[in-house]
Amino acid sequence: MVKIKICGLKEEEDIMFLNDFPLDYMGFIMYPKSPRYVSDKLKKLLFLVKKAKKVVVFVNPSYEEVKNALDLGADLIQLHGEETPQFGKKIGLERIIKVFKIKDNLFDFKELSLWKNAYAILLDTYIKGLPGGTGRTFNWDIAKKVVSLGYKVFLAGGINPDNVLFAIKEVSPYAIDIASGVELYPGKKDPEKIKKLFDNLKMISC
């Protein structure tokens, strides 16, 4: 069964609402330029999560920032910048979801191999100035290739309740990562879209 991650959470009520769904991961963004940035609310938001694994998202952080997130209760660290494998090893690769952004349908498989021992690889769409939450898909043939190589892949970029089943069927990822696809606006989730998402996901096991 594919895992589900909802990212970009910043409202307490959204976390409380999601606690009642079979959600595997919740993502919290610690990137000041993002409209989904949680700032000093991180500790409180992480505390509210009941069952899902807690993923804290950074763009080129310091080791101290990452360590603080882990000390506050993060289970995994998602790296969205130009972080090196050496930095990942310092944190512990088993705790790292490393993001690769697909630009012009090109992909550096050599760079990917340097992160083969990471917890997972997340594939997202590249848009200049946007580290994530683009709301746009990329060429999923690349994702299928990465999956075929044996990587644990989180598929992101433009996935929503209407295309989630198609994405799962096409790519067979380890997990689906959704942010803008279940939002009213950046950082605020839409309860109706979330209900629709999980209703549609039930069809997989039917």
Image: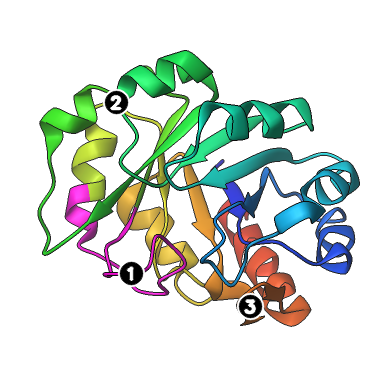
Q: Would you call the spot at circle 3 few (<14 residues within 10 Å), some (14-19), or many (20 or more)?
A: some
- Across and down, in percent, residue 89 comes to 42, 15
Find numbered disc 3 in the image and state the secondary structure of the residue it sits on: strand
The residue indicated by pointer 3 is 183
Q: Is residue 145 left or right of residue 196?
A: left
Residue 174 in picture, x, y percent from top left? 46, 39
Report whether residue 161 is seen: no
Residue 133 lies in the magenta-colored region: yes
Q: Earlier in the sequence, mark 2 or mark 1?
A: 1
Tell me whether the residue at label 3 lies in contact with that at label 2, contact meaning CB atoms closer than 8 angstroms. Answer: no
- Indicate the position of residue 186 as horizontal and vertical percent values: 60, 77
- Mark linked to residue 103: none
Identify the residue at the far bottom of this view. 184
Question: Is 42 drawn above or below residue 89 in the view shown?
Answer: below
Q: How many marks?
A: 3
Q: Is residue 192 visible?
A: yes
Q: Residue at x 56, y 34 (%)?
A: 77
Q: CA distance from mark 1 to mark 3?
A: 20 Å
**Kind of residue sitting beneath label 2:** Gly
Give the residue at mark 1: 129
Q: Which residues are magenta?
A: 124-142
Q: Nearer the viewer, mark 2 or mark 1?
A: 1
> For this rendering, which residue is in front, 3 or 67?
67
Q: Residue at x 83, y 51 (%)?
A: 45
Instruction: Give the amino acid type for the residue marked by disc 3 in the picture.
Output: Glu
Return the mark for residue 150.
2
Predominant secondary structure, magenta span: loop
Quadrant (top left, top right, bottom left, bottom right) of the C terminus: bottom right
Taking the image as shown, residue 149 lies to the left or right of residue 20, namely: left
- Image quarter where the N terminus lies is top right
| Residue ID at (55%, 46%) | 57
